[in-house]
Image (cartoon, grey):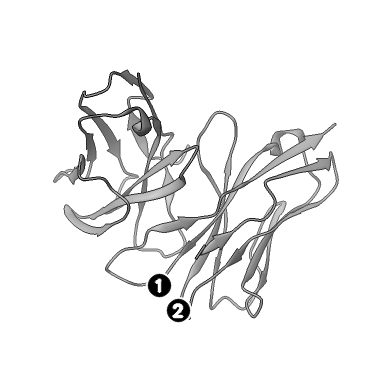
Amino acid sequence: DSGVTQTPKHLITATGQRVTLRCSPRSGDLSVYWYQQSLDQGLQFLIQYYNGEERAKGNILERFSAQQFPDLHSELNLSSLELGDSALYFCASSGSLENEQFFGPGTRLTVL
Amino acid sequence: AQKITQTQPGMFVQEKEAVTLDCTYDTSDPSYGLFWYKQPSSGEMIFLIYQGSYDQQNATEGRYSLNFQKARKSANLVISASQLGDSAMYFCAMREPLNNNAGNMLTFGGGTRLMVKP
């Protein structure tokens, strides 16, 4: 158990819909990262938050947005969903040490 | 250009034997970190081992060791005494540069599927 929690574990929805994925980092970790794992793109970094502020952006679509709240949990919002958004979405967190980035169990999103 | 390359899409190893999973990387920054993760069929990403670019010795964690050859830009994972439970996808990842407040995201390779034969 990495200490990072993600809900829900599975999500099935239809094209055009909007969903919210939730992540709670390990206790004390200020950084939260979101990654997407799909068959065609592999594992890709989406976005990072540090102590409530956006710190880095990767290959995140404009239809996607994220935020980190004062209690440090984070949410990834995916809107106008397309079939190609079906993927495993991971949240990871890290503290001040350079040698760590721990992943949550992931949310498997299926868009029908 | 690929920053992290894993050239072995799939590998077989006999139970109790050692296996090496290849990883090469590309960076011009002198400060970086290399990670290996295991992803079993259940889907979670399990951290295995870390090597910093300034570390003098190769990292080891139990049956896992990292064969770090800086000049060749390779960071191969060695698993000794393979077990059936080692069957999984293995991902190499790089964080660069270190100590950069702009972001510490990981860049992943395409992965290697390891299958351990009884």
* Relative side of A100 to B117, left or right: left
Point out residue B4 in the picture as x, y percentages from the top left corner.
Answer: 54, 61
Q: Quadrant of residue B39?
A: top right
Task: Identify the residue under disc 2.
Answer: B29
Callout 1: 10 Å neighbours few (<14), some, many (20+)?
A: some
Point out residue B81 in the picture as x, y percentages from the top left corner.
Answer: 81, 46
Secondary structure at badge 2 equals: loop
Q: Residue at x 82, y 43 (%)?
A: B13
Q: Residue at x 45, y 79 (%)?
A: B29
* Relative side of A25 to B68, left or right: left
Marks 1, 2 in one chain: yes
Between residue A63 and residue B81, name the one nearer to us.
A63
User: How far separated are the C-alphas under marks 1 and 2?
Assistant: 6 Å
Q: Quadrant of the C terminus of chain B?
A: top right
Q: Is residue B33 visible?
A: yes
Q: Amino acid at mark 1?
A: Pro
The answer to the question of whether label 1 and label 2 lie on touching residues, with beta carbons closer than 8 A, is: yes
Task: Identify the residue under disc 1.
Answer: B97
